[in-house]
Amino acid sequence: MSSSGPDLVCQLDNVQALLFLRSQLLSVEDLENGIYISFFGLANDALSYDYTASLECLEKPHKPQYGGGIILNPELNHGLKGWSAFGGAEMENRASGGNTFIVAHSRKQMNDSISQKLHLHKDKLYTFSAWIQVSSGNTPVTAVFRTNSGPQYAGAVFAESGCWSMLKGGLTVDSSGPAELYFESEDTSVEIWVDSISLQPFTQEQWTSHQDQSIEKTRKRKVRLQATDAHGNPIAGAKMAIKQNKLNFPFGSAISKYILSNTAYQNWFTSRFTVTVFENELKWYSTEWSRGKEDYSVPDAMLRFAKQHGLAVRGHNILWDNGNNQPSWVPSLSNSELQAAVDKRINSVVRRYSGQFIGWDVVNENLHFSFFESRLGAKATGVAFQKTRQLDGRTTLFMNEYDTIEKSGKGSASPDKYLQKLREIQSFLRGGGNLGIGLEGHFRTPNIPYMRSAIDKLAAAKFPIWITELDVDPSQPMHLDQVLREAHAHPAIHGIVMWAAWKPEGCFRMCLTDSNFKNTPTGDVVDKLLQQWTHAGLVGTTDADGFFETSLFHGDYEVAITHPTVTNSSLIHSFKVASSTDISPESALLVKVSA
């Protein structure tokens, strides 16, 4: 089947024609399996990114993001135009309460659903969203794009009956070509209802522009410095040299015990980072290798080192739910003995370090593993958080998981499953306690649009979010650059810790230095970004009213002022650029420096 571009456009109704115009249609490609509409993204670089994500199951879905983007008939107001049955499903257009939507029914296989054919481009970043409902119960539904290189998962959601849930995701593709959007659910007994679908392509330039805009808004603030003389008169033409002493955004890496005796390691680390975590030294198997014989001498020394150098520390971890990572004597305990040992561990480690860590990973990776819940019951995780809160009530208590932002689809640690577990823990704390979201970030090939969308959804829960164990394949340092930029730019991220503790035998996966503490390629990425996230050698000259205005990252600063009329050869003044949700980024901080 083939058709020319003009002929096809003539067949479109007004709404579809507007979609063509908005998306700047450049060509219609004739392909063997039908007509695929080829879009090359929006030329409007000012198109902003929509961070909105909904956790509520609503009576009516929201309008599609970006007006549906390149999806045809995204609100199903024009029947089934643009949509086809996928697999063995049957489909129909339905309406309820003034809202129209598409339904896939009579499903026999998990991927029996509805679909739309598209043409995707490898140089685009796609954000995807849809509102999903099922005919009964509560079940995961996944959005999938079938491409020439295989299925690409864009995201998943727990869909319910009787209300609409927002699925938000994203994807990139390895090569340009035809693709087909469809939905999956392992529960073939349910109908899949879909509405308000959106697929919006962004160029890399647009994506980078979004990051820059977010950084300006959330990580920086306008600052107006005014130089005045002893009588309060402005000094025009004064030179202002600004030096940043500390970056407020927490950025760091894990450390090992070898930092205690290695000056080169110490100098390399402390000249860069503001936060750290002990890789293995605080884990239960390190502090109580033999039953009843606790030894905290190494983590004590590491904490003293961190304090001496002004490094904040995350507490990792109290318990680890992986049965293979327990002290060797723990698995053979009876259930009652195990409960007593767990209680003793929590009391011991939390009391010892209460108030000294900025966060605790309480039961590490308990979406992937279930050692304690399988032995002590379904309440074991919640009770551990409850006891930790009682002993250290002001410190943030984290769930810490991998594959929540690294891997799209319906895995055991998807954003929906993460939030479901977090709500369960919150019920044990009765609404109290400072809960936090810990995202490890062990990336293979990063799916940056999905990473952003997953953080969007988690952010809707209003808990602080940290990237806690970030690493990439060290042979692909550009992936570290991509992930760090995305994390730093996202307004919901409160801090980043890389998983790159140096040891003589090598790092867990990614090293930032070699054994002589010269940067590896991934270390070069870190230094390059630190230069971009800090200010060095910033010099300006005051105007006729004595003002010099600039935009500065949140942090601690000194400004040195020199001018022939200033009696001191160089007048130095300290000031802070603080981050606060109460301060508009457009509101300039006024710093007066009097000579």
Image (spheres, helix red, strand yellow):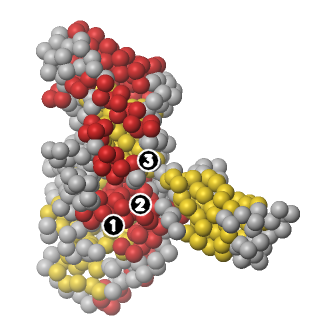
Query: Closer to the N terminus: mark 1 or mark 3?
Result: 1
- Disc 3/disc 2 C-alpha distance (Å): 12 Å
Q: Amino acid at mark 2?
A: Leu
Q: On the rendered image, what quadrant is the N terminus found in?
A: bottom left
- Element assignment for label 3: loop
**Residue type at mark 3?**
Thr
Residue tagged 3: 274
Residue 32 in view, yes or no: yes
Q: Which residue is mark 1?
A: 126
Amino acid type of the residue that numbered disc 1 sits on in the rendered structure:
Tyr
Callout 1: SS: strand
- Residue found at x 54% / y 58%: 244
Mark 1 or 3: the one toward you:
3
The residue at 40%/53% (across/down) is: 272
Q: Residues within 10 Å of mark 3 (few under 14, many from 20)?
A: many
Q: Is residue 47 above or below residue 308?
A: below
Residue 214 rendering spot, x and y as whole percentages: 50, 62
Q: Toward the viewer: 36 or 295?
A: 295
Q: In the rendered image, which quarter contains the C terminus?
A: bottom right
| Contact between labelled residues 1 and 2, with CB atoms less than 8 Å apart | no
The alpha-carbon separation of the residues under discs 1 and 3 comes to 34 Å
The residue tagged 2 is 530
Q: Position of residue 591 (x, y in %)?
A: 70, 59
User: Which quadrant of the view contains residue 279?
Assistant: top left
Judge left or right: residue 48 versus residue 171: right
User: Disc 2 and disc 1: Cα gap in Å?
Assistant: 28 Å
Image spot of residue 159 (x, y percent): 34, 44
Residue plotted at (22% across, 9% down):
337
